[in-house]
Image (spheres, rainbow, N blue to C red):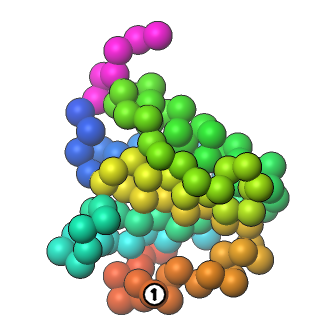
Amino acid sequence: MAAPVKTATSETLLATVLSSLNDDKAEDIVQIDLRGKTQIGDYMIICTGRSTRQVASIAEKLVQRVKDEYGITPKTEGKDTGDWVLIDTGDVIVHVFRPEVREFYQLEKMWQQTAVPTAN
């Protein structure tokens, strides 16, 4: 296994996360800038996978990519059920939901003023 090649800043992590989500066909990706608003991280990303299998796959691939590129092992929650997965890289927090679960939690509404849809 090669040593990590990138320095983990919130911006480089964000770019890697968005690239990974796009590569794995995540849908409705929303980027929320948390800088200066909370201490939990600099960015929150919310996206959708079409099925429990895709949600789990998106999460697994993202965790592996962050680990390979930065040497960081993100904390995860929810991967066992595949309805939603939280991936915490430290500076970037990622929520991957099935469509119905995303609609139920409506996280974007909590952060509405800072939410920015990204182009897929």
Q: Residues within 10 Å of mark 1 (few under 14, many from 20)?
A: few
**Tag 1 residue:** 110
Q: Residue at x 47, y 64 (%)?
A: 45
Q: Is residue 101 positioned above or below 3 on the image?
A: below
**Residue 3 position within the rendered picture, expressed as x and y whole percent measured from the top left:** 35, 15
The span shown in magenta is 1-6
Nearest the eye: 89 or 19: 89
Closest to the observer, 107 or 6: 107
Is 3 covered by the magenta stretch?
yes
Give the x, y percent position of residue 106: 59, 84
Q: Horizontal and vertical percent for residue 5?
A: 30, 22
Q: Quadrant of residue 67?
A: top left
Left or right: 71, with 106 as reference point = left
Q: Classify residue 71 by image quadrant.
A: top left
Q: Position of residue 22 (x, y in %)?
A: 57, 51
Q: Tell whether 70 sits left or right of 97.
A: left
Residue 35 covered by magenta stretch: no
Q: Is residue 90 left or right of residue 22?
A: left
Q: Residue at x 37, y 56 (%)?
A: 92
The residue lying at 69 percent from left, 84 percent from top is 104
- Which residue is found at the position 23% from the left and 45% from the top? 9
Which quadrant is the C terminus positioned in?
Answer: bottom right
> Residue 28 versus residue 120: which sits nearer the camera?
28
Q: Amino acid at mark 1?
A: Met
Horizontal side of 37 relative to 60 (left or right) equals left
Find numbered disc 1 in the image and state the secondary structure of the residue it sits on: helix
Q: Is residue 81 visible?
A: yes
Evaluate whether residue 26 shows in this view. no
Total labels: the figure holds: 1
Q: Farthest residue to the left: give it.
A: 36
Q: Main secondary structure of the magenta part?
A: loop
Residue 68, above or below 19: above
